[in-house]
Image (cartoon, rainbow, N blue to C red):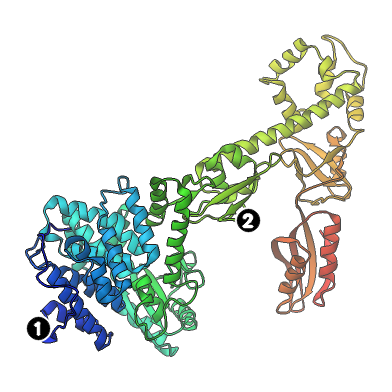
Amino acid sequence: MDPMTSFEPACSLSEPLVVDATALPDDMLELERVAGYLDESQRALLRRAWAMGATAHAGQVRSSGEPYITHPVAVARVLAEQGLDVETLLAAILHDTIEDTALTRDDITAAFGPTVAELVDGVTKLDKLQFRDRQEANAESFRKMLLAMSRDLRVILIKLADRLHNMRTLGAKDPRSRQRIARETLEIYAPIAQRLGMNLIKAELQDLGFRALYPRRHAVLEKRIRAEPVVRREALVQIEANLAQRLAKEKLKHRLISRVKSPWSIYTKMRAEGKSFAQVMDVFGYRIVLRTVADCYHALGVVHATYKPLDSRFRDFIAIPKANGYQSLHTVLFGPYGSPIEVQLRTEEMDLIAEKGIAAHWAYKEGKDASDGPNSAQSRAYNWISGLVESQHDAGSSLEFLENVKVDLFPDEVYLFSPKGDILSLPRNSTAVDFAYAVHTDVGNQAVAARVDGRLVPLRTRLANGERVEIITAKSSTPKPQWLEFVVSGKARTAIRQQLKQIGHEDAVQLGHRMLDRALEALGSSLERVPAARMDDYLQEGKYPRLEALLADIALGNKMPSKVAYILASEPGEQREPGAAKRAHTAMTQEKILITGAERGVFSFANCCMPVPGDEIMGYHTAGKGIVVHRLDCPNVAEYRKSPDRWVPIGWDRTVTGDFSAALRIEVDNRPGALAQVAAAIADAQSNIDRVEYLDRDTNIAILRFSIEVRDRRHLADVIRKVRRLSVVLGVQRI
C-alpha cells in the first residue's frame, strides 16, 4: 500500500450520508454509468459509500499525487465491469478504510450491514500479505488468504481488482518497487485469477506484469505484433469469411472473433517451446460463440468440413470441464496458408464464465444464474477452496499448507497429502502408483489399491491437486508389468522395472533349481551332493558369477538341465554308460511342473494356440524364452516332437489366478449393429475384448476375430454360449 497520511474524520461517520448526484466527481459518475445494471436505490448506496470513504480518506494521497479515494473508486469500477453485485462494489469503495483510516468495522456494519463489513475486513487481512516470491512467500499469510476466500469468494475478487488498478498505475512507483510488484503479480495474482477462471483479469495482469518486469522485451514484441504483415491480415480475413459463410449456410447464429496473442503469451510460448517469434505467430486463432451446446457440436462439424482437422488436437472441455469451470470445444485445423487454425467453440454462458470465471456468478443476477450445476466456475472454485481449507487441518504447519496451495497456482506439479499430512510433489498426471513409490519403494512394490479422499480407487487413477492419498498394501503383492503403461514419474518407472526384473529372476532361479535337481536325482545325485570344487569349476567355465545365474539360465532354456546334471554328476574323466543323460531327462520329466499364473517371467503362452487353464498342455524349452506353453492339440506340437529333450511336462495348479488370452472366430449377419451385439454379449460374460478384426466380409456375412481375456475353459465356454444365443450370430469357434 502507498504511504498514507494519518487522519481524524471531520464529521461523525455514524450519521446518515445524503449525497447530491450532481456534485459527484467524474470517476464516481463513470462508476455509476458502468454499474448501470443496478437499480437507483443501489446506486444511491454507492454514492453514500463514496461519501463515507472520501470523508475517511480526506487528506490522503497516492504516490501519483491523486486523492486516495480515486483508487478504491477505480477498484469498484473494475468490479462493476465484471457485473458484480452492489455489496461487492460497496466493499471495494471502502476496502482500505479499516486499515488506513479511523473508520471501524462497526461503523461499516451500521451503515451498510454485516456482509459488506465482513468483506472489507477480509480484504484488510489480505492487504497485509507480503509476497516476495514463490519460495519465500509467507506461509501463514497464504493460510489466512484461503480461509478468507472460503468464507466469501468476493474477498479475492476485490483483492484482484485492487491489484489490477495498482498495476495500471504502477508508473508512479520507483523501479525496485515496480519489479517486486510485477513479479508477485505474475507469480501469485495472475495464477489465482486463472485458477478462478477470470481470464480477462488474468490476461491484463500478465500483460501489465510483463511490461513492468521486462519493459524492453515487452516493447519489442508489441512492436512486432503491430507490424503484422499485410499477407497475414488478409489471410485472417479470408479464413474468417470462409468460416462465417459455412456457418451461415447451416443457419447457425453465432459470433465469430479472431483472437490475437498477447505479448506475454507469445513470450512464454517462445521460452517454453523454444520457438521463434514467426513460429509462434504463424497460428490463426478464432472463437465462435453460439446459442446452445447442440449448436457448438453442429458448428464443430461445419468447421471440420471447411478445413481438415488435426485429429490429435481436439479437446472436449464441454463434456469434461476444466477444474476452474471453463467449458469449450477446442480444435486445430489445417489452414489454407500452411498454418494451423486454432478454433474455440462455446455458448454465450460459457463465454461469460471463460472471461469472468467465478465473477459470472454475481453477473446479471436478474437472469439465469451462472452458478447452476456442479460444473460452474462458482461451485468448482468453492470445492477447490473448501478442499484446501479442510486439508489445512491435517497439514500440521503453515508451510505444508502453502505447498498445497502452490500446486493449483503452478500446475506443472501435483501436490498431494499423505494420511499423516505430509505433502509430496509429483509430475502432472501422476497416478496412485506414482504416489506409492514417492512415499517409499517398498510401499510401491506392495501396493494393491488406494484411497483418495476416503474413496477406494484403482491404482491407475490419476491424482488431482490437493487430494489426500492412502495406499493399501499387501506383503504378498508384487508390481505388475501393466503399471509401466500409466506411471509418469521416473522414480516409479525405475523401481517397477527393477522389481519386475528381480521377480522374474527369482522365479527363474526357483524353476531352474527344481529342473536341475530332478535331473540329478535321476542320476543318483543332488545339488547338495555335487562337490563344491566341481560346481565352482563348472560355473567358472561357463562364466557364471553365482549358482543362481546358472539356475536362471536353465529355466530360460539357455542350458538343458539333463546335460548340466550329466556333467555335474560325473567324476572327472568318468564315462557314464550310454544314454545316461537321456535317462536323466526322462526321469526329470516324469513329475509335472504346475502353473499357478504368477510365473509369467518364466512361462509364456504360445500365440499359435493360446492355452487357458483347463486345457491339456505341454511345455517346450525355448532358448531365451524359458518354457513356452502349448495346447496338446496345437498344430505345432508335431514339430516339437522332433526335439524330445526340450519337452517339459507341465500342468495347471488347483488354483490359477490371472487372465489368459483366447481368440474366437465369429460369423455374423453383415448388418448394422451386429458387431455391437457381439461385443455386448462378451462384456456381459465378464470378459475383456483386446482386439477385433474382420477376417472376411461380403454383403451378407462377416467373419470376425475377437481377441479376448478369460479366466479358464469354463469362462471361455460361458462366453461362447452367450455369443451363440444371439440371432445375428451364425457360428462361433475357438481359434
Which residue is pictured at 38% across the width and 85% down the height? 254
In the foreground, 636 or 29: 29
Left or right of residue 69: residue 141: right
> In the image, which disc is placed on residue 456?
2
**Residue type, numbered disc 2:** Leu
Which residue is pictured at 27% across the width and 56% down the height? 186
| Residue 627 % position (x, y) | 78, 38
The secondary structure type at the circle numbered 2 is strand
In the foreground, 59 or 489: 59
The secondary structure type at the circle numbered 1 is helix
Left or right of residue 141: residue 502: right
> In the image, which disc is placed on residue 324?
none
Does any portion of residue 82 appear in the rendered image? Answer: no
Q: What residue did someone put label 1 on?
A: 23
Circle 1 Cα neighbour tier, 10 Å, few/some/many (<14 / 14–19 / ≥20)? few
Could you give the CA–CA distance between mark 2 and mark 1, rounded to whole angstroms? Answer: 65 Å
| Residue 21 % position (x, y) | 14, 85
